Image: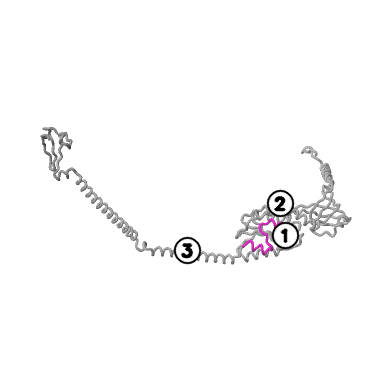
Amino acid sequence: MFETSSESPAPVRVVSEAIKEYVDRLGPIWIEGEISEINERSGGMAFMRLRDTSVDMSMSVMCHKSVLSGVSPLPQNARVVIFAKASWYTKSGTFTMSAREIRQVGMGELLARLEALKAVLASEGLFDEERKVRLPLLPRKVGLICGRNTDAEKDVVENAKRRWPSVEFEIREVAVQGAAAVVEVSAALAELEAQEDVDVIIITRGGGSFEDLLPFSDESLVRLAASCKTPIVSAIGHEKDSPLLDLVADVRASTPTDAAKKVVPDISEEIEMITALGQRARRHILSLLDLETSRIENLRNRPVLKDPLVLVTTREEIVTGLRDRSTRSFTHRLTLASEELLHTTARVRALSPQATLDRGYSVVQLEDGSIVRDPHSLSAGQKLRIRLAMGETNATATGN
């Protein structure tokens, strides 16, 4: 590391040599990517572009034709691993990778890598059903990511409009195959996700080979789809095809036509359902009206509603009966009490001293009011009071 400033800048030569020193420290490394371009030149050298499918990035790789012949013929967009040494040319200030060995990634190895990536994503919960978002009944606008002028686009749009003629689409035509597919699909997905009026996004392409569908199993694209809040429908390839995007999408459609059926309802079916619901509601309301009418009729036929005063008259009869019963009971009790009082009066009168006096008897009393019971207790000349039936008289004792 050397220090520079505007007063003491480093010459181009010094900077270029410093970069070469840093690059030389890297040593030979293994690199993976897709070959997007191959140019064989006279002199025994070949040049190619090695592209990263997850981002829009590539680098130049050179090798001797003998290295390239070891894997010839190498198809376009072939996925390879290259053992190369980084080189920096100080005079021209250019960077290149010199390949020493090239290996084409086989189908078995690709499948193994996909299975490993699938296991990692599954362990993170990106395929869980709890993360799936339900599709809206009728989206305001449908986002569609598809190839340029493809049958898949026509199938989705035509079938959707056949089912719901007023459905609106926001279409993004991108590369759905090759080195640029991941970058363009990801950009289109991010753009549609940012639009508030897009309620669902369909990602579709027709069938193809395993290699053709590899972009839809790219880790960066799958993670981007998992992070989207807008529901995603994946309609990639045919029923037997299963890229990782199918597993992370909220809904998996077997074909582009199936995607259209899942995203928008059939207007004729909806009209039939609404009509059936309307008839069902009408029958229910009529049934309720009939029930309430019957109840009102039954209430109206009750005696209390025919003659509202029946409540008063029936209570009046009860009150009158209770009153008469009370009067009879009270009169009877008075009669019994009166008879009992007469009998008691007669008995009292029969036992009264006055009754005895009325029969001719008299009561002799001394002056102090005490009754004389023994004539021998009297003395001659003692004053006496004699009580008779009609009054009293005085007397004097004369002796025995």
| Front of the two marks 1 and 3 | 3
Classify the position of the N terminus by image quarter.
top right
Q: Amino acid at mark 1?
A: Ser
Magenta span contains residue 193: no
Which residues fall within the magenta stretch?
240-264
What secondary structure is found at the residue carrying circle 3?
helix
Res. 147 visible in picture: no
Vertical relation: 384 (above or below) 117:
above
Q: Amino acid at mark 3?
A: Leu
| Percent coordinates x, y for residue 166 in the rendering | 60, 63
Classify the position of the C terminus by image quarter.
top left
Magenta span contains residue 259: yes
Q: CA distance from mark 2 to mark 3?
A: 55 Å
Q: CA distance from mark 2 to mark 1?
A: 18 Å
Q: Which residue is mark 3?
A: 288
Q: Amino acid at mark 2?
A: Ser
Between residues 209 and 285, which one lies in front from this camera angle?
Answer: 285
Query: Which image quarter: residue 389?
Result: top left
Between residues 366 and 101, which one lies in front from this camera angle?
Answer: 366
Q: CA distance from mark 1 to mark 3?
A: 53 Å
Which residue ends up furthest to the front in the rendered image? 400
Mark carried by residue 275: none
What secondary structure is found at the residue carrying circle 1?
loop
Is 98 on the left-hand or right-hand side of 229?
right
Q: Which residue is mark 1?
A: 242
| Percent coordinates x, y for residue 32 in the rendering | 80, 53
Vertical relation: 287 (above or below) 398:
below
| Front of the two marks 2 and 1 | 2
What secondary structure is found at the residue carrying circle 2?
helix
Q: Which residue is mark 2?
A: 123
